[in-house]
Image: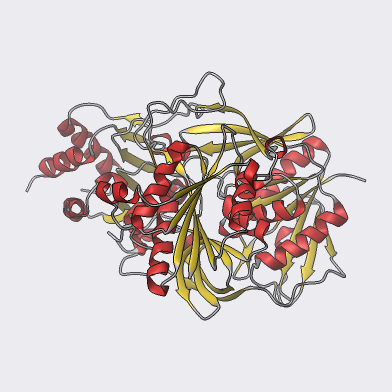
Amino acid sequence: MKGTILTIAEHRQNSLREVTFELLALAHELGKAQGLESVCLLLEGEEQSLEGELKGWCERVLVLKAKGLEVFNQEIWQAVILKVMGDRRPFMVLFSHTPWGMDLAPSLSVSSGYPLATDCVSVVIRDGTPLATRQIYGGKLFAEVSLRPSGTYLISLRPGSMRVENPFGLVTQIESLMGIEIPQKTKKVFKEFVDTGAGEIDISQAPFLISIGRGIGEREKLEEIKELAERMGALISCSRPIVDKNWLPKYHQVGTSGKTVKPKVYMALGISGAFQHVAGIKGSPTVIAVNKDKKAPIFRVAQYGVVEDLFKIVGALKETLGG
Amino acid sequence: MDVVVCLRRVPFTQEVDLEIDKGQRQILAENLAFVLNDWDNYALEEAISLKERTKGTVTAITVGTEEDEEVLRRALAMGADTAIRIDSEGLTLDPRNIARLLARVIRGLRFHLILTGAQSDDLNEGCVGAMLAEELGLPHASVVNKIELGEDVLEIKVELEGGIEEISTIKLPCLLTIQTGINEPRYVSVMGIRKAAKKELKVVTIEELSLDKEALVPDVYVERLFYPPETGGAEILEGDPHIVAEKILRILRERGVIS
């Protein structure tokens, strides 16, 4: 029997998450090289039919359709995946390193006894075992990790790690899963989704953003930046620490848990450039970064960099613009 | 409500150049400052504030060396009642084994809720919490940014991607991993930490947990560390601030965002 790479599909509000296709891209790449079948496991509600979107992306989709599978629930997902892993003995199972994946993969690793490497950015297979690359210390270093020898390996992938364009043109078989019991009572019960993104301004449409991060140091300094933004006709956005400290409302936040922006120019002041932040500015053609730390990861994605105290630059910009 | 909070001490690496040691598997830690992991600081504040609201207790736990006790002293100063360090005895422990050790100790404690940070600043694995919950057979949720108390249940918010949050209920006892920004961690004075030095800090060895060191085989093994591959990177604008400002303004005009 051909070995398999099993990908766990993630969907929300009736659409597959982009990261699912990234996982399938990784499964396809590894599968082609190793002669493994790429199989996607889709758990969905009775009224849903997301399997259509997966055509061409993998060789097989295992679909389990039932009431209660409209929204992710770790307890249900874990029970079903354990059963599927037991029946099919995949060589590798791929998860997304998202809040839901972070809930599911580690717990499944313990209950199945299979080793897990989380938050990987790339995976290769060498001598029959996976070698994964992870980013550590905020992206300042990379680590290559191996896993304890096992029949099945679990990997969770950082969203944004794989480039996804078009389906691979694979002939996809859709197979319905039968006879799997779904836990009816769970200890965690979903209530609703809320959108925190709405606010007085919409940074996602702005042509010019001046974005601030931890580097501004004090709340009072925000005024200086506001003045500059006003003079230049820019909107203010920020990275996560500014919202965590309550210095700006959530709708200013750029990144995976905030907004995705695509301004003509994104000027990042005192932002180190954690991947969660950088993921939100991929659509911006020009990023100008000002940071004291010459090793800050933001300089790896910026087109222009200034290694300097941001307030010296802010002051000089104001003076140069004149009164 | 009795809360157990798991803490980790991590190197402070912002604006610091990291060096890889000769063995290629670790960083050179000698010249680094160490702090409480940021996510854990929020988890700790949440634990203390729950204790204050419900007249409960807080137990802070870490796995590590004597130096790591620093984060426990901080927890005691913030209001934790007891602190436990599981001695790592020079072992490099992966998340699975850290979860295993924590579970052994926590199983013997009285608690309603376990909190951990959603991830750690250093290795970013984000999995000890959910592993620990599974070891203990507890329901769990990851990346929680709001907790409201109910009768034998909590109402929680989980921060998803794209500004969407998930509201759900979860039965106690349970484990939650905490996202930054859930609260405003209180300030801890040096004086407070000094005073807390008198509070009891318990040390547990691996042997006392009836675990065999040899059996703590890691699931994940670091083969090597390396520096990020060189990319094109940014064109660095040099010169004194006024010259740099001129250059920036020229770019902004070229891109048509200022006139």
Residue A30, placed above or below residue B7: above
| Residue appearing at x 36%, y 49% in the figure | B74
Residue at the limit of the structure toward the bottom, as seen here:
B151
Percent coordinates x, y for residue A152 in the rendering: 79, 45
Q: Quadrant of residue B237?
A: top left
Q: Is residue B159 left or right of residue A292?
A: right
| Residue appearing at x 93%, y 46% in the figure | A1
Q: Front-most of B234 and A188?
A: A188
- For the image, the number of numbered tags is 0
Asked whether residue A192 appears in the rendered view, the answer is no
Residue A288, placed above or below residue A262: above
Colour scheme in the image?
secondary structure
Residue at the limit of the structure toward the right, as seen here:
A1
| Residue appearing at x 38%, y 48% in the figure | B73
Q: Is residue A172 left or right of residue A217?
A: right
Asked whether residue A184 appears in the rendered view, the answer is yes
Q: Is residue A200 left or right of residue B40?
A: left
Percent coordinates x, y for residue A32 in the rendering: 78, 39
Q: Quadrant of residue A161?
A: top right
Residue A147, placed above or below residue B130: above
Q: Front-most of A285 and A161?
A: A161
Q: Is residue A116 left or right of residue A260?
A: right
Residue B121, placed above or below residue A142: below
Residue at the limit of the structure toward the top, as seen here:
B22
Q: Front-most of A206 and B28?
A: B28
Percent coordinates x, y for residue B135 in the rendering: 67, 56
Percent coordinates x, y for residue A101 in the rendering: 62, 56
Residue at the limit of the structure toward the left, as seen here:
A323
